[in-house]
Image (cartoon, rainbow, N blue to C red):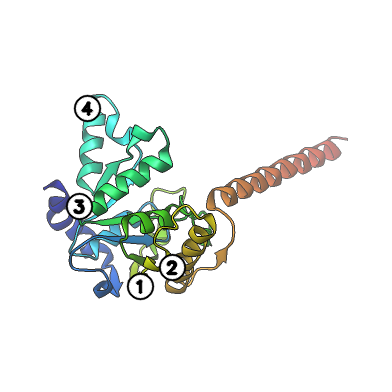
Amino acid sequence: MLYWFLKRIALGPFLRLIFRPQVEGAANVPAEGPAILASNHLSYADWLFMPLTLPRRVTFVAKAEYFTTPGVKGWFQKKFFAGSGQVPIDRSSGNAAEGALASAKQILAQGDLFGIYPEGTRSHDGKLYRGKTGVARLALESRAPVIPVAVVGTDVVAPPGKKFGSFTRPMVRFGEPLDFSRYEGMENDRYILRSITDEIMYEIMRLSGQEYVDMYAARAKDEAKKAEDETRRLEREAAAEAEAKQAS
């Protein structure tokens, strides 16, 4: 109930009025039955705008900590995340990746839409990074079609590392469903999983127009941070050297 209250009465109308999000290809999402919505990930606002363009509920998995924080703050946090279409990762397996997969399969088994970001984390520079193969395993084990999704402009509305950005009209594009039934029974073949994942990422790239980088987003972030730290170190050394020359 809270999900539909936020989407139809509280948060949804506000976002539509202010940002007027655009949508293309919404008819590619089935009116009923399970489907995996595999999207690029530019901003924390992605999970707000993408579901807003569909009449059906879209569910994502979120860190279990969002649902287990004690106290009043934890209660409100749990209600918000649950109400905005997120469920906690199933920790019974003891592994976050396996737990996310288990939670996702439960959602799809109920005939619902499941949203996933194959990159695993937000892009720090607007480029599209290599997808993780969990989306491929999920597609094969659940036998649900995969809908590639491109969300464009959310990194302008809510840039990475900042609370606020500038105004633009976000665009959400839904591609045609991808059927991987030809690979049934091959969910443990890592080459098949990589092939499926790359096909999904190619479709997302085609829809989004992003530059593709064959590197995991988390590693790219780490390398960018190291380069930034090194640049700052060199700048400090140069400044200290300049001060020393002036003093002498």
Q: Which residue is mark 1?
A: 175
Is residue 42 visible from the viewing direction of this image?
Answer: no
Q: Nearer the viewer, residue 110 or 244?
A: 110
The quadrant of the rendering that contains the C terminus is top right
Query: Disc 1 vs disc 2: Cβ atoms closer than 8 Å?
Result: yes
Label 4 residue SS:
helix
Q: Which residue is mark 3?
A: 110
Label 2 residue SS:
helix
Quick one: label 2 or label 4, which is nearer the N terminus?
Answer: 4
Q: Nearer the viewer, residue 121 or 236?
A: 121
Where residue 109 sits in the image (x, y, percent)?
23, 52
Q: Quadrant of residue 155?
A: bottom left
Looking at numbered disc 2 in the image, what kind of residue is underneath it? Ile
Label 2 vs label 3, nearer the camera: 3
Q: Which residue is mark 4?
A: 72
Left or right side of 76 for 134: right
Label 3, label 4: how many angstroms apart (C-alpha)? 31 Å
Query: What residue appears at the point 19 percent right and 45 percent down from the top-left corner?
Result: 83
Query: What residue appears at the point 28 percent right and 67 percent down from the top-left corner?
Result: 21
Label 1 residue SS:
loop
Q: Within 10 Å of the Cα at label 4, are there few (<14), some (14-19), or many (20+) other Cα atoms? A: few
Q: Which residue is mark 2?
A: 204
